[in-house]
Image (tube, rainbow, N blue to C red):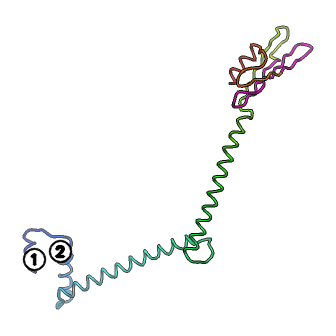
Amino acid sequence: MLFISNNIKNWNFTLYEIVLILLYYFFKKCFMDISVFEIIIIVVLLLSIGAIVFIYFKLQQAQKSYHELLSGVRKGNLEDILKQHLTRIETIDKKLTANEENLYRFKDVAKNYIQKVGFKRFNPFHETGGDQSFVLVLLDDHNSGIVLSSYHQRDVTRFYAKYVVRGKPEHKLSKEEEEELHNTM
């Protein structure tokens, strides 16, 4: 125990030395005739037991993960199971790719559907009361569609439909029609 007495003067202990000192004095008190070699054997034995407990719990975790991996798969070896999972992933990937392609096609087709709607009520004739006339603008994503107008007088209501191609009307528009077409685009 020469190394202990030298270190006590310097107070220069490592954690390992402190554990050895405590174990030495503990076993010296409990077992008067125990040697340092026997203490080392006991420490190694305790560390081995701790390692066995640690490995046991890690093995339990690995078994749990293994069972989760195998859930929903018929019995077989691991290679077959992994091949089944890869086949399922490839099938899902192909379906996803097909769905993405369909989505892009639907987006292109949807550009031709009515996407923009404008509506305005107005009174073009001062002898009638209220805003009985209206302009309805229906355009797709390319600003093509129709301008539907209704002009209401006391005894008659007239409807007009005018085509619009890429934002340009094919017929002359009234002031209200031009305003609503511009607001809708």
Q: Which residues are magenta?
A: 132-160
Number of other residues with Cα within 10 Å of mark 2, as a class: few under 14, some 14 to 19, many 20 or more = some
- On the image, numbered disc 2 is attached to which residue? 17
- Identify the residue shown where x is 70% and y is 27%: 143
Where residue 110 appears, as percent x and y from the top left, is 71, 38
Answer whether residue 85 is magenta in the image: no
**Horizontal arrangement in the rendering, residue 168 relative to residue 125 (left or right):** left
In the displayed structure image, the side of residue 145 where residue 53 appears, left or right: left
Furthest residue to the bottom?
33
Q: What predominant SS class does the magenta segment belong to?
A: strand
Marks 1 and 2, how far apart at CA:
10 Å
Residue 159 location, quadrant = top right
SS of the residue under disc 2? helix
Q: In the figure, is residue 32 to the left or right of 78?
A: left
For image coordinates 10% across by 81% down, the residue present is 1
Number of numbered labels in the structure image: 2
Mark 1 residue type: Phe
Residue type at the position of mark 2: Glu
Q: Does residue 120 lie above or below 25 as drawn?
A: above
Furthest-right residue in view?
155
Q: Disc 1 marks which residue?
A: 3
Q: Quadrant of residue 164?
A: top right
